[in-house]
Image (cartoon, coloured by chain):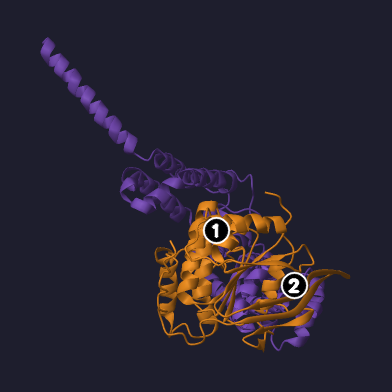
Chain colours: A orange, B purple
Amino acid sequence: MSVAVAVAPPAREFDHNPSLSLDIRAVSHQFDLGGARLPVLSSINLNVAAGEFVALLGPSGCGKSTLLRLVAGLEAPTSGAILADGAPIDRPDPSRILVFQDPTLFPWATVEANVATGLEARRVLSSQRERVHEALALTELTAFAGAYPHQLSGGMAQRAALARALVNDPALLLLDEPLGKLDSLTRLTLQEELVKLWRRRGFTALLVTHDVEEALLLAGRVIVFSDRPARLKAEFKVDKDYPRHRDDPEIVALRREILGTLGLKT
Amino acid sequence: MSEGIRTLDARSAAGDSASLRGLWQAVWKQALVAAVTWAAAALATVAMPDVVPWGSAGLFAAITAGAAVLFVLLAFVVHRLGHVGERLVYYGPWFIAIGVWLALWELTTAKFGWLPKPFFSPPHGLLNVYVTDGPRILICIAYTLRLWGLGFLSGIAVGYGVGVALGWSKRFEYWGMPILKLIGPVPATAWIPVTFYFFPTTFAASIFIVALASGIPVAILTASGVASINKSYYDVGRVLGADNWYLIRKIAVPGSLPHVFVGLFMGLYYSFAVLVVAEMLGAKFGLGWYIQFQTAYSGYANVYATLLIMALLCSGVVRLLFSARDRLLNWQKGFIS
């Protein structure tokens, strides 16, 4: 089953590069906790090529999510630099969209209004409203466009959050355990959908997860982080065609190896 | 009579009584009881003379008797009135109780004089006030609504703006919150001497007092509402390219709305409370002024009649605010129920 599936052409002309490269240079970061300093990231060096799908694995609370916040531009690193296509990141930008672990949909807005947020904030909604409908169709939420978030199931809410990100055609999609709180069946479905979306749109993806299998099913490269303060511990290339299968012997072997790196015996 | 005819008779009688029972089941019985209590009130009003004459006894008896007739009619047709009918049926026990209340009120005041004039007034005494002093009361209602409307609307507008600024800006909060907390508990009416100095007219001073009473709770609760919004909503907004103005309009404002409405309800009650006092400030008309004026002349019937109007006005406004809240916060439904 090594027939490479032809990648579908992009559905629409992009008004910017479909993907960007990321250069994380000697980034360290610490939190100020009422005088005490808590180091969370320790000299991280990481290059992500344009269009690559990279998974960041590590124990809970090791600082992976913080790295994503830095890349999103929500916070500035204590030291080091992060470059997107060679330009330093100093603020959030709609070309780099972060999807949080919780859907964090605005409860006062309908699904459609939530998905439209990015376009509305950049004052292009009236000319590009069909993008909202596309994103809703892509995530199979068209029938729920008028629903409020409290009326959605967990999986639907997370799909809506994904639609809210994708409507902006991000060149870099930052995924902070977006499937972590879903039931396993919904998770498997959304994992497949994520891969499809990535292959279709061609954006760069950075996924934080603590699910080894998820990392192996989605990513081309898996980076393993140490315990806090996080430093790079190991790196694994996953050279497999999509769709991947969890019981593929190579995936199983890699999984065992990675779990070993994380300190688990299998 | 033969056996056959008798059984036939018995059978048809049984059929008649069954259909009668069916009809009787469809009748709204509480309306019949209400008709009795309202008729009793009418009867008590006309059958016995007033200890001291109050006037309008005939009119009051006519109204209550008319209501009694209406209840009898409603008892048979209420089921055809759809939604309105359902509401009426729901309030059935209240209609009964009001009839009882009116009858007892008549007897204890006008008829037996246990609750004497001028301190107490029978219901037809209040009616007589509306009949004889109606135009003046209408003018007073208009003046009161003008003062309350201007005061409340300007108060909540400023209070809301201040609240959003306090909740949004750290610096504004640093300087503003201690001041607000200091002056918040001071009764708005305590500022009357100062307002006389600062405002050109007593009317403007009255508006300010009402505005202050309604604005402070709105400001405090709006500030806490804005400050309590989940910070990740702002992160989401910023990631999606929102500027500060967008974050305020589309996240801080709708997200704080549940708190804001609590503030609005508090402001509403405070504004009613100070309204009467504010109307003492050299006003020529207004319900508060009218109450003051009539109290001075021991016109307690007029005072009660005015209080009744104020109560109805207040509950009407509260109701309006409730329906506005239900409309604006319908996204919350799942959280509340």
Determine the chain carrying the residue at label 1.
Answer: B
Residue B256 left/right relative to A76? left
Tag 1 and tag 2, C-beta contact below 8 Å = no
Task: Say which of B289 and B171 sits in front.
Answer: B171
Q: Which quarter of the figure has residue B241?
A: bottom right
Indicate the secondary structure of the residue bearing disc 2.
helix
* The furthest residue to the top: B3
State whether residue B80 is above or below residue A191: above
The amino acid type of the residue labelled 1 equals: Leu
State whether residue B268 is above or below residue B149: above
**Residue B280 visible in the shown view:** no
Residue A222 screen position, x and y as percent: 63, 66
Q: Which quarter of the figure has residue B204?
A: bottom right
Q: Residue at x 82, y 74 (%)?
A: B178
- Near mark 1 (Cα within 10 A), the count class, few <14, some 14-19 or many ≥20, is many
Residue beneath disc 1: B126
The amino acid type of the residue labelled 2 equals: Ala
Quadrant where the N terminus of chain A is found in the figure: bottom left
Between discs 1 and 2, the one toward the N terminus: 1
Residue B2 left/right relative to A161? left
Task: Say which of A215 and A187 sits in front.
Answer: A215
Q: Nearer the viewer, mark 1 or mark 2?
A: 2
Residue B32 screen position, x and y as percent: 39, 40
Residue beneath disc 2: B188
Task: Say which of B164 and A41 sits in front.
Answer: A41
